[in-house]
Amino acid sequence: MSGYTDITVTLENYVATVEIQRPPHNFFDYSLIGQIADAFDAMDADGNCRAIVLAANGKSFCAGANFGTGKSDGSGSADFTEEGFRNTTGKLYREAARLFGNKKPVVGAINGAAVGGGLGLALVPDFRIASTEARFAANFTKLGIHQGFGISVTLPRIVGQQAANMMLYTGRRLKAEEALAIGLADQVVPHDALRATALALAAEIAENAPLAVMSVRATMRQGLMDAVQQATEHELSEQKWLRATEDAEEGIRSVAERRAGNFKGK
């Protein structure tokens, strides 16, 4: 299926595979999230699709957001610039909320790091199959900012409030087996078995009566898209003032330099 610049979409035996194509780390921006949402909408409208696998090509599943300069000419970089953040985050979150409104079940194939906003993207699927090389981190406090992408709602919904608090307060990175222990991953498999395992789960879902599956899923995820929309409004307001602090500048530098931040509370 053509028409996308940063993802590929294939459909076979009632299972669609939506694969992110920004290796090695698959940083996301407004365009990429919009393409994934458009692909989900297309699969909702396709009677030959009954389940979706969300995967990524590269070392990381998604290492976070590319806010760059916020310009539309493609000149942005992976730098977390204040200008880019201010100009793009609101519309990016509106696209992100669309991901929670699709009708078909989604299985995530988490091949590597899912960090920051990339963790938010990994929380979109109904299930997560993780490679032994997968890592999960809500590293926002290490960056000096507030979580986004609806993580305030989606993370505690999956792992419980206490486990979510632990991840968010500490910013610690969880290995695949640690993620499995708290329910963040549903299954951990060897790296070379990841795609086949995710496809097998999607195929198992697709064997069932499709109208019934969509009905059950709609009940189980009732209100989720609205909750994410409300959460991102609050998250964005907190992120905006924190992004302008000295601690955020230090946090962004320290993460880039792979060292502990020297924070001043300013």
Image (cartoon, rainbow, N blue to C red):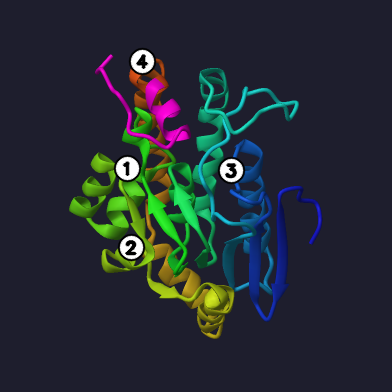
Left/right of residue 118 with respect to residue 168 in the rendered view: right
Q: Nearer the viewer, residue 235 or 78?
A: 78
Residue found at x 50% / y 59%: 112
Q: Amino acid at mark 4?
A: Glu
Residue found at x 33% / y 29%: 261
Task: Name the mark nearer the viewer: 4 or 1.
Answer: 4
Task: Name the mark nearer the viewer: 2 or 1.
Answer: 2
Inter-mark Cα distance, 2 to 1: 17 Å
Q: Give neighbour class at mark 4: few <14, some 14-19, many 20+ (Cα, 10 Å).
A: some
Inter-mark Cα distance, 2 to 3: 21 Å
Q: What is the magenta range?
A: 250-266
Q: Is residue 251 magenta?
A: yes
Inter-mark Cα distance, 1 to 3: 21 Å
Circle 4 sits on which residue? Answer: 246
Left/right of residue 66 with respect to residue 174 in the rendered view: right
The circle on residue 152 is 1
When the figure is inspected, residue 248 is found, relative to residue 111, above or below; the finding is: above
Residue found at x 51% / y 42%: 64
Circle 2 sits on which residue? Answer: 179
Label 1 residue SS: helix
Circle 3 sits on which residue? Answer: 27
Q: Amino acid at mark 1?
A: Ser
From the top left corner, tell me how far across and down residue 260 is, in percent: 33, 33
